[in-house]
Amino acid sequence: MPNPSPIDAALAHLDQLLEGVPFRVSLYHDVCSLSCLHCGVKGEAYFKERKRQTGASSTGSWLKILRWLSQKDVESVVLTGGEITERDDFHQLVIEAQWAGLKNIVIETNGRRFSDPQYCGLFSPGKRLSYIVALHGSSSSVHDGITGVPGSFDETIAGISNLASMTDSRVDVCVVLSKYNVHDVCDIVNLARGKGVRTLFITLMILRGRGIFENLPSLEAARASIRDLLEEFSGIGEDLLFNNVPLCFLGDCYKNSINYQSMKRKGAACELMFHTCNLNWSFIAEMALPTPLNYPECCAPCFFRDFCPAPSYISLFADPEKYVRPTQLLNTS
């Protein structure tokens, strides 16, 4: 009997680790077409170097992984990045995921590729898909200033419009709150809702990678921005959600916080992270409520500080029997 391929061996190993355990999956593409000032990694130079070092894992490997996932208790499959649409085989992976019967397929994207109607038309049958598009300004001066790419605002807006009109899929928007757009958030929400967007995710930038302290909005500006949002958009209820935002900013709307929702779900499901550039970087983890929030003057003395932070980082399983190093999990070399 021939030896199993590295992918088959890795998936067999996962079968043992995940037996009877519900889990969420992210397919993470470690290449991006933007260089955002709040990015959790080191920006454009980092992505270019990773791409030079690794290229991308084969389409055949990913098709095998998607078929394996279709037989498991998977809560959701998130295709994210970086920018997942930078993969030449992205459409093929999405179609395979649908044919395999995977549900709750979420595509996190900057939307630029979908500004091309011909490309967007490839996804018109995608009724099982949900798109979360990153929009960081209500104008090109704000958005492009954050992304570092002139013209990206116009492409993202066109991508949102095409997705909303051509795909029969749900389209949501994510806004990363930084000092560069903190006064623009209400206008961003108005713009997005005018394009047919359903849910808005407002995420306070994380102090990681290019997201340095100097790019963080002041405590007073962030609190005022959230207050204005809650007042102006009180009628949209659960379609306005917050992540990594102190619960005290939200008042009676604290249940709109992903922080709060994750606190209730902690330990309910684990995370399986696949890196589409290099399968050797993939790992299994559990979501934690891990890090102090970004405003020590507000959060450090707070009684609820250990419960408030969003699950913005991932910790490997503490159980030594389930602790899996990335190179051990999917060693495809």
Image: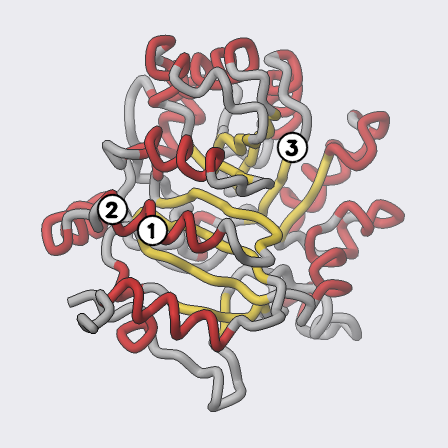
Furthest-right residue in view? 252
Residue assigned mark 2? 60
Tell me the amino acid under the disc marked 2: Gly
Query: Is residue 278 left or right of 128 when viewed as pictured?
Result: left
Q: Nearer the viewer, residue 234 or 91?
A: 91
- Using the image, tell me which numbered label, if any, was put on residue 203: none
Disc sitting over residue 64 in the figure: 1
In the image, 11 versus 305, the foreground residue is 11
Q: Secondary structure at mark 2?
A: helix
Q: For the residues labelled 1 and 2, say whether their Cβ atoms are less than 8 Å apart.
A: yes
Q: Closer to the camera: disc 3 or disc 1?
A: 1
Would residue 325 be found to the left or right of residue 233 on screen?
left
Q: How is the image coloured?
A: secondary structure
> Percent x, y for residue 105?
53, 39
In this view, the residue farthest toward the left is: 52
State the SS at label 3.
strand
- Quarter of the image where the N terminus is located: bottom left
Q: Residue at x 28, y 53 (%)?
A: 42
Quick check: 257 left or right of 48?
A: right
Residue, disc 3: 200
Query: Where does the image place residue 24, in percent across and percent down from the top left?
Result: 56, 56
**Residue type for callout 1:** Lys
Task: Say left or right for 30 vs 216.
Answer: left
Q: Nearer the viewer, residue 312 or 221?
A: 312
Give the mark nearest the N terminus, 3 or 1: 1
Q: Are circles 3 and 1 on residues that touch, CB within 8 Å?
A: no
Q: Quadrant of residue 59?
A: top left
**Amino acid found under the numbered disc labelled 3:** Leu
Label 2 Cα neighbours within 10 Å, binned few <14 / some 14-19 / many ≥20: few
